[in-house]
Image (cartoon, rainbow, N blue to C red):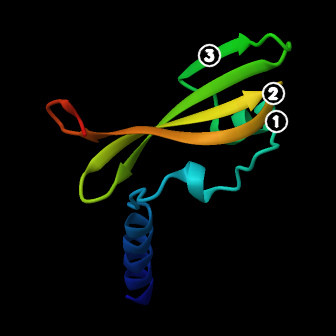
């Protein structure tokens, strides 16, 4: 009887713990810092959904990696995180516009 109760309690605990909702951006809560290499950022977050690159007149390569994430704050929001690199070194993080996500459509807020 104790084994059955213990097993049931374990199952309920695992199910409860696995149902967490992201309430903060992982880009502002993780250990991402200016000075990180592009390779280190991709190792942490995976391949971005979009990239852009240009070289300025001083031969500095500017790269922008775009990552989307969904955050729950009374409603679901989609956030675009834009990471700015110069010569493959992270300079800054910009959080783009937030979009309220509706099951029927995406509403720009």
Residue in the foreground of this view, choosing between 101 and 59? 59
Residue at the extreme left of the image, as rendered: 104
Question: What residue lies at 38% left-to-right and 50% top-to-bottom?
Answer: 71
Q: Which mark is residue 69?
A: none
Question: What residue lies at 81% left-to-right and 27% top-to-bottom?
Answer: 88
Categorize mark 3 by other alpha carbons within 10 Å: few (<14), some (14-19), many (20+): few
In this figure, what is the number of numbered marks? 3
Residue 77 vertical placement versus 73 (above, below): above
Residue 69 vertical placement versus 65 (above, below): below
Mark 1 or mark 3, which is nearer the start of the sequence? 1
Mark 2 or mark 3, which is nearer the start of the sequence? 3
Q: Is residue 94 left or right of residue 38?
A: left
Residue in the foreground of this view, choosing between 54 and 26? 54
Across and down, in percent, residue 11 comes to 41, 70
Question: What residue lies at 67% left-to-right and 41% top-to-bottom?
Answer: 92
Q: Is residue 72 left or right of residue 49?
A: left
Across and down, in percent, residue 43 comes to 73, 37
Helix, strand or loop under label 1: loop
Q: Is residue 43 left or right of residue 21?
A: right
Q: Quadrant of the C terminus?
A: top left
Q: To which residue does mark 3 refer? A: 52
Mark 2 or mark 1, which is nearer the start of the sequence? 1
Q: To which residue does mark 1 refer? A: 37
Residue 48: which quarter of the image? Answer: top right
Residue in the foreground of this view, choosing between 44 and 37? 37
Q: Marks 3 and 1, how far apart in space?
A: 16 Å
Q: To which residue does mark 2 refer? A: 88
Q: Are marks 1 and 2 in contact (CB under 8 Å)?
A: yes
Helix, strand or loop under label 3: strand
Q: Marks 3 and 2, how far apart in space?
A: 12 Å
Residue in the foreground of this view, choosing between 89 and 31? 89
Residue at the extreme bottom of the image, as rendered: 2
């Amino acid at each position: 009887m104790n084994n059955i109760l213990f097993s049931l309690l374990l199952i309920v605990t695992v199910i409860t713990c696995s149902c967490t909702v992201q309430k903060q951006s992982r880009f502002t809560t993780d250990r991402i810092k200016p000075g990180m290499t592009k390779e280190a950022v991709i190792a942490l977050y995976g391949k971005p959904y979009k990239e852009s690159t240009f070289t300025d007149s001083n031969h500095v390569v500017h790269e922008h990696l775009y990552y989307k994430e969904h955050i729950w704050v009374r409603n679901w929001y989609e956030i675009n995180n834009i990471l700015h690199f110069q010569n493959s070194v992270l300079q800054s993080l910009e959080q783009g516009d937030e979009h309220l996500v509706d099951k029927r459509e995406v509403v720009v807020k």
